[in-house]
Every structure is written in structure tokens, then in C-alpha cells.
Amino acid sequence: MAGDEQVLVVETKVVEQIGLFRGLKFDVQPYLKAIFTAGVTKFMPRSQAETNPDFKQIIPYVIMGCDGKFLSYVRGKRAGEKRLVGNRSIGIGGHINPIDDMPLFGDLLETYLTAVAREVEEEVHVDAKHHERIVALLNDDTNEVGKVHLGIVHYWNLEQAKINRREQMITQMDFMSLDELKAAADTMETWSSLCVEHLEEIANNSNVGIEPQKLMNR
């Protein structure tokens, strides 16, 4: 881990004021409104954020599906989070860094969504159109990784299963059925196993979550 890497964080108490939870929270709007209020988020050194549960590192967690199957991969040795190496995942994404002088004021949600698209493109190249929804917030304080991270779960419904990996840490990448993912549950990182429990609902119910554009217009 680069000691001087800056990552986007929010104070844990901001989440607690709305309601702390474990697992997935589908009522995303109150949390996103609070988190992306000007002056609430900030950047801090990752080396400090990793050991300070007073802050949550904001992590986009993008799940991709196509024709009843979902992108899955195993985190290789080059993964940034060493505690997750060897685990299967269904989430693409990572820390938000202050790239391109990312402002912390103005339209923060739009800035965040631009950062998410950039983060995904760094890890995989998606050669297909997709429809996007922000479907849940993800939190798990039962382990050391979860205590200092807050996931924002996006679902990308792809028109075609055309994806190529860019990052070396992504290994054994494939589209898997829900049954196959459930069978591999004991090999998954905690966040992915929590998402798999609700994956059928997320993928098949368009009322779960909200389109980013609609969220920005509210």
C-alpha cells in the first residue's frame, strides 16, 4: 500500500446518524444525500484510514450482469487490499482518489459517478452498452476490512457479455449463473456473499435502487 495514497472517506458518525446497518441497505437516497453534501467527504491518507474506524472509505462496488449470469473473478496477488487476495468477488471498483483535481464541492454525486466510471475502466474494459442503477449501500463491521469501508453497490445490466480485464489482479474472470455463485459462496469475500443473497432481486426487479440521473435530479 502506498503510504501517501489519498482516499475518499466519510465520518462513520454520518452513517450512524441515519442508521447503522449490516449487509445491504436498499433505501439509498438518505445516505447518499448526506454523504454527498458539500464538506462532508474528504480525502485522507489510506494508511491512516485503514486503521481508523471513525472513518469509512467510500468504495463503489459495481456488479455486472447479462442474460442471467454475473461477472465474477478471483482477486490475485496484485490486489490492492491484501486481506482479500484469493477470494472470489462479483464487485468491480475500488478507492476513490483525487484524480484530475476532483473537487469536494459542487455537484459531488456527478463527480463521484465520473470517478466510478474511471475506476471500472481501469480494471476492466466493457465493450457493451449498459443500464445502471445504484441499488444499495453495503456495510459489514464484523471484520477488520469492513469496519473501515462503506460500499455503494451499482448494478450494470449489460446488453452483451463483452468484457476484457485490464488489471493483473483480476484472475479467473467469467460470467457465472446464480446457482454457480451460490455454490462458490464459501470462497467469496464477505461483501460478495452478502450481495449474492439478494442478487436475484437486484437483477430482476427494476424497482430496486435508482438510476443515477434520477437521483441527481431529486
Image (cartoon, rainbow, N blue to C red):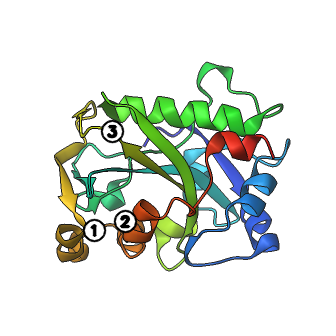
Instruction: Please tell me which residue lies in front, 209 or 32.
Output: 209
| Residue identified by numbered label 1 | 188
Label 2 amino acid? Ser
Q: Residue, x 57% and y 33% (percent of image)?
A: 115
Mark 2: few, some, or many residues within 10 Å (few <14, many ≥20)? many
- Disc 1 is placed on an element classified as loop
Can the viewer see residue 149?
no
Q: Decide if residue 135 is on the left or right side of residue 123.
A: right
| Residue identified by numbered label 2 | 192
Q: Residue furthest left?
A: 172
Label 3 amino acid? Glu
Can the viewer see residue 80?
yes
The x, y position of residue 10, in whole percent, is: 72, 54
Instruction: Please tell me which residue lies in front, 55 or 189.
Output: 189
Q: Residue, x 81% and y 56% (percent of image)?
A: 34
| Residue identified by numbered label 3 | 159
The x, y position of residue 83, in whole percent, is: 35, 61
The x, y position of residue 216, in whole percent, is: 74, 41
Label 1 amino acid? Met
Quarter of the image with the N terminus is: top left
- Disc 3 is placed on an element classified as loop
Spatial separation of the CA atoms under disc 3 and disc 1: 26 Å
